[in-house]
């Protein structure tokens, strides 16, 4: 994707300041799915973006409506029908800087049909950290652990918190299904509450599918009937394996039914093509 927007100016090679966001990871960001040439759940992302900026002491000068217009300009300039945008706010010397970049979305139909393999790791998620509930630029630990997981043949890695409870993945929220009940770690477990996570909870409640947010152990995860993960680009992704344990995917699963309800309700996303 050639074009980016930096403080409202669109160019192929923006002159980006070496600010505290670049030097120290002092910033926040949102990754927004683009389907059929439009940002998906944009208002949800902007609400979280504003809250994250507030926690980090950043000043979001641009109104979300203006950010939306700049996103549409980037989509048009890069001729994106299906892809992703990243909106980043970083700490500047005099004013904070807003960068919008674009990239591809690699989650295709074949990946959904195969499902993903995820694994445990030895790192502990600190549920009391100030950064754990916001999408900050401090993603190095996640990336290192994700790379280690991929080197072992997995697609994602799981964090547990200091109390041994399931928290989140490096880039996803987790859901497990047991006896027809959908379970997902509560916010106080040490996780970033994803846009799709919140939408899925809303969807399940609206369709009278049992859903609970709670504190779950590794043993409960391994004993689950089904597992799926979510984030803004993959939306609802079936999991076929956690460590050495296999799970069913495909038709006749509750995950597949939830996925169908999601698409029926919002009718767009990474599987629109």
Image (spheres, grey):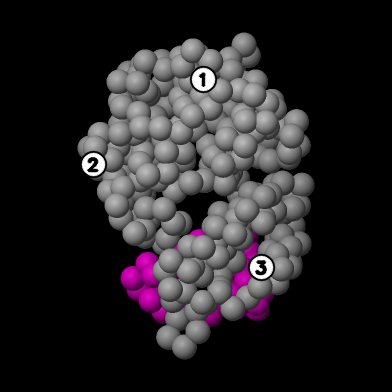
Q: Taking the image as drawn, is residue 20 in sight?
A: yes
Are the residues at dot 2 and dot 1 in contact (C-beta closer than 8 Å)? no
Mark 2 Cα within 10 Å, few/some/many (few <14, many 20+)?
A: some
Q: Is residue 253 above or below residue 56?
A: above
Mark 2 secondary-structure assignment: loop
Q: Is residue 200 above or below residue 250?
A: below
How far apart marks 3 and 2 lie (CA) works out to 36 Å
Between discs 3 and 1, the one toward the N terminus: 3
For this view, does 45 lie left or right of residue 273?
left
How far apart marks 2 and 1 lie (CA) works out to 26 Å
Question: Label 3: which residue?
Answer: 64
| Residue found 56% across the figure and 54% down from its top | 31
Q: Residue 73: x, y in percent?
A: 73, 67
Q: Residue 162: which disc?
A: 2
Q: Residue 97: x, y in percent?
A: 52, 77
Question: Label 1: which residue?
Answer: 181
The magenta stretch is: 1-29
Q: Taking the image as drawn, is residue 175 in sight?
A: no
Are the residues at dot 3 and dot 1 in contact (C-beta closer than 8 Å)? no
Between discs 2 and 1, the one toward the N terminus: 2
Q: Residue 182: x, y in percent?
A: 51, 24
Mark 3 Cα within 10 Å, few/some/many (few <14, many 20+)?
A: some
Q: Residue 214: x, y in percent?
A: 40, 32
For the C terminus, give its image quadrant.
top right
For this view, does 252 lie left or right of residue 132?
right
| Residue found 67% across the figure and 55% down from its top | 42
Q: Residue furthest bottom?
A: 94
How far apart marks 3 and 1 lie (CA) works out to 37 Å
| Residue found 42% across the figure and 44% down from its top | 187
């Amino acid at each position: 994707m050639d074009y980016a927007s930096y403080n409202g100016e669109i160019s192929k090679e923006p002159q980006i300041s070496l600010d505290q966001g670049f030097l120290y990871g002092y910033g926040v960001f949102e990754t927004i799915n683009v389907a059929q040439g439009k940002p998906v759940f944009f208002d949800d992302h902007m609400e979280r973006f504003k809250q994250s900026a507030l926690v980090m002491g950043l000043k979001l000068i641009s109104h979300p409506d203006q950010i939306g217009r700049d996103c549409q300009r980037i989509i048009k300039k890069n001729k994106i029908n299906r892809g992703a945008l990243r909106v980043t706010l970083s700490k500047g010397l005099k004013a904070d800087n807003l960068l919008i970049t674009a990239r591809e979305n690699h989650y295709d139909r074949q990946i959904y049909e195969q499902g993903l393999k995820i694994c445990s790791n030895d790192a502990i998620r600190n549920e009391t950290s100030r950064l754990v509930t916001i999408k900050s630029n401090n993603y190095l630990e996640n990336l290192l652990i994700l790379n280690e997981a991929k080197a072992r043949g997995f697609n994602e890695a799981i964090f547990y918190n200091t109390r041994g409870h399931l928290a989140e993945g490096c880039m996803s929220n987790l859901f497990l299904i047991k006896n027809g009940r959908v379970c997902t770690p509560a916010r106080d477990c040490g996780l970033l509450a994803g846009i799709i996570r919140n939408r899925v909870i809303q969807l399940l409640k609206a369709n009278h599918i049992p859903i609970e947010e709670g504190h779950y152990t590794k043993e409960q995860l391994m004993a689950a009937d089904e597992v799926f993960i979510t984030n803004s680009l993959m939306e609802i992704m079936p999991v076929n394996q956690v460590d050495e344990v296999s799970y069913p995917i495909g038709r006749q699963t509750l995950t597949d039914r939830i996925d169908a309800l999601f698409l029926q309700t919002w009718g767009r996303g990474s599987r629109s093509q």
